[in-house]
Image (cartoon, grey):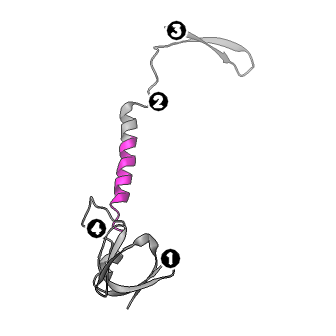
Amino acid sequence: MKEAIRVQNPDGSFKIVFRENNNRPSNNIKQETKETKDNSDNKKHEKKKKEIQDPRYFNPLNPEHIDIFGRDLLNKDLIFSLLNGETIKGKMIGFGQYEILLESGNKKLILLKQGIMKIEVL
């Protein structure tokens, strides 16, 4: 199928040029297909997965990475300053993602990490 195009000459006059039109998109125009969209979604997913595997964060799916600070403070005598102004002395015997298990005297306490302002090592 031929297509007519109006083209302007350098002197200002116009001429009509005919060209073939195959009704196909040209090769230099990239159409977004489902595959390219899936690839971009996969890249986002891989980036997020990589962030989750960062050793600074607790990840139950990857148990080889544990809380660096918690591991170093296990079985040490500590002083916890809480947000409400209380101080608690004790030995840290365990920890999780959101809590710390503390032995103070004959009692075992669970402290939420969000309530701790400061930790001092004795």
Q: Mark 3 points at which residue?
A: 2
Q: Which amino acid does label 1 sit on?
A: Leu
Provide the secondary structure element on which disc 1 rests: loop
Q: Mark 4 points at which residue?
A: 65
Asked if residue 82 lies left or right of residue 96, the reply is right
Distance (Cα) linking label 3 and label 4:
67 Å
- The earlier-in-sequence mark between 3 and 2 is 3
Distance (Cα) linking label 1 and label 4:
28 Å
Q: Name the residue under label 2.
A: 28
On whether residue 51 falls in the magenta region, the answer is: yes
Closer to the camera in the image, 104 or 75: 104
Disc 1 crowd rating (10 Å Cα; few below 14, some 14-19, many 20+) is few
Q: Mark 1 points at which residue?
A: 83
Asked if residue 75 lies left or right of residue 30, the reply is left
Q: Which amino acid does label 4 sit on?
A: His
Distance (Cα) linking label 1 and label 2:
62 Å
- Indicate which label's residue lies in the foreground, 1 or 4: 1
Highlighted magenta segment, given as a residue range: 40-56
Q: Where does residue 32 sit, x and y in percent of width and height?
A: 43, 31
Q: How many labels does the image show?
A: 4
Q: Quadrant of residue 27?
A: top left
Circle 3/circle 2 CB separation < 8 Å = no
Q: What residue type is labelled 2?
A: Asn
- The earlier-in-sequence mark between 3 and 4 is 3
Provide the secondary structure element on which disc 2 rests: loop
